Image (cartoon, rainbow, N blue to C red):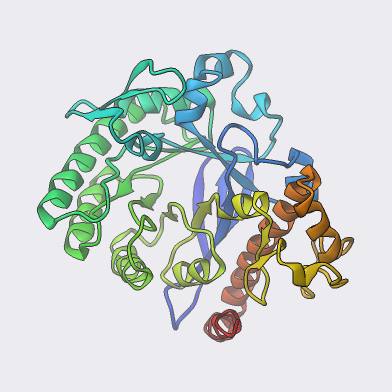
Amino acid sequence: MFSFEIQATCPHTGARAGILHTAHGDIETPVFMPVGTQATVKGLLPRDLINDLDAKIILGNTYHLYLRPGHETIRQLGGLHKFMNWPRAILTDSGGFQVFSLSGLRKITEEGVMFQSHLNGDRHMFTPESTIDVQLALGSDIMMVLDECLEFPASHEAARVSMERTIRWARAAYAHYRAIGDDGNRACFPIVQGSMYPDLRRACAEQLLELNADGYAIGGLSVGEARPVMFNVTEETAPHLPAERPRYFMGIGDPEAILRVIAAGIDMFDCVLPTRLGRTGSAFTWEGRLNLRNARFARDGAPLDEACTCSTCTRFSRAYLRHLVTQNEVLALRLLTVHNLSFLLNLTRDARDAIRTGGFAAFLDASLTRLASH
């Protein structure tokens, strides 16, 4: 049965440590979730994610899996867990962000979003109900409702209209979910919208509380706004979400931002950034972000990060990794992805441990100072 328990709270910040109980295992929070857009975390095998990284939960993308290979195909093959041979938990988004990114290829109505496939131009319709149906076919542990992802920047009036539509869609999606999919073994999260306006975020959160949902997400941030604004909106919104339910920040994945949203009381977060950086030859370190194409690494025998114990850092030098990157070797993608995910997962685990032992405020200050020094 899906449930959430809080084990410790930092008395100086809003940070929480807890456990998500799912049908595919327990997940300690706060947790960073690697993104497996098309039923794969690019460059890695499931055993890498389990044995090397001990990732407890990953993401799949409803939009992409709906188009290829199709949710009914995945259902017939035993669901997404079996299809991709992943025994642990899976969160799927609604596909809304991808659809709303198709500028010029989609049309919003009260019923949902009509869009053209980026693959072949075929027309499709996502509704609050249909995106629940797709995710039920995929068999994910945590599903997201369809929301309107407003472009940034937006006026207060445009944000209000969009936010109110998001609430109506959430009510329709949740009614459908309660009727056909709420068996206690999975969860469904609505998404708080409202652009950069704290009053709209508060109003959205308060109305979504009526759903008595399994958890709540904050969407529509990290979309181009100034970082202080993003952190401020998060800090303003989180306290209006129920303390006993998990809180999910959609789409954030750099070390400083992760620490700051944890301090704001966020339990879950994801981002394609660590895997994307790995594919482009860059790595997270406590010395800052390293671009391995830089010539200064050509004879550098040190690991990517002296403090990191991942399988990349314990076996390979910066010089070797630079060689792989400059020669466009596929192994570079794999090794840098392992390191980048390990860096964020370890950072999150350390933050979790600090919350439990009562030292999170000091850990936060020390970590942010260390990151800022480079």
Q: Is residue 134 or residue 312 the one in the foreground?
A: 312
- Residue plotted at (35% across, 51% down): 219
Q: Say above or below: 59 vs 202.
A: above
Q: Say above or below: 161 vs 15.
A: above
Q: How many marks?
A: 0
Percent of width and height locating residue 345: 65, 60
Q: Say above or below: 264 vs 87.
A: below
**Furthest residue toward left:** 157
Q: Is residue 53 visible?
A: no
- In screen coordinates, is 315 left or right of 44? right
Percent of width and height locating residue 195: 25, 56
Percent of width and height locating residue 269: 50, 55
Q: Say above or below: 46 vs 260.
A: above
Q: Is residue 188 or residue 166 the one in the foreground?
A: 166
**Furthest residue toward front:** 295
Q: Is residue 53 or residue 265 the one in the foreground?
A: 53
- Residue plotted at (57% across, 48% down): 21
Q: Quadrant of residue 30?
A: bottom right
- In screen coordinates, is 192 left or right of 10? left
Q: Quadrant of residue 244?
A: bottom left
Percent of width and height locating residue 330: 77, 43
- Residue plotted at (29% across, 26% down): 127
- In screen coordinates, is 32 left or right of 190? right
Which part of the image, by quadrant, shows the C terminus?
Answer: bottom right
- Residue plotted at (34% across, 58% down): 242
Q: Is residue 229 visible?
A: yes
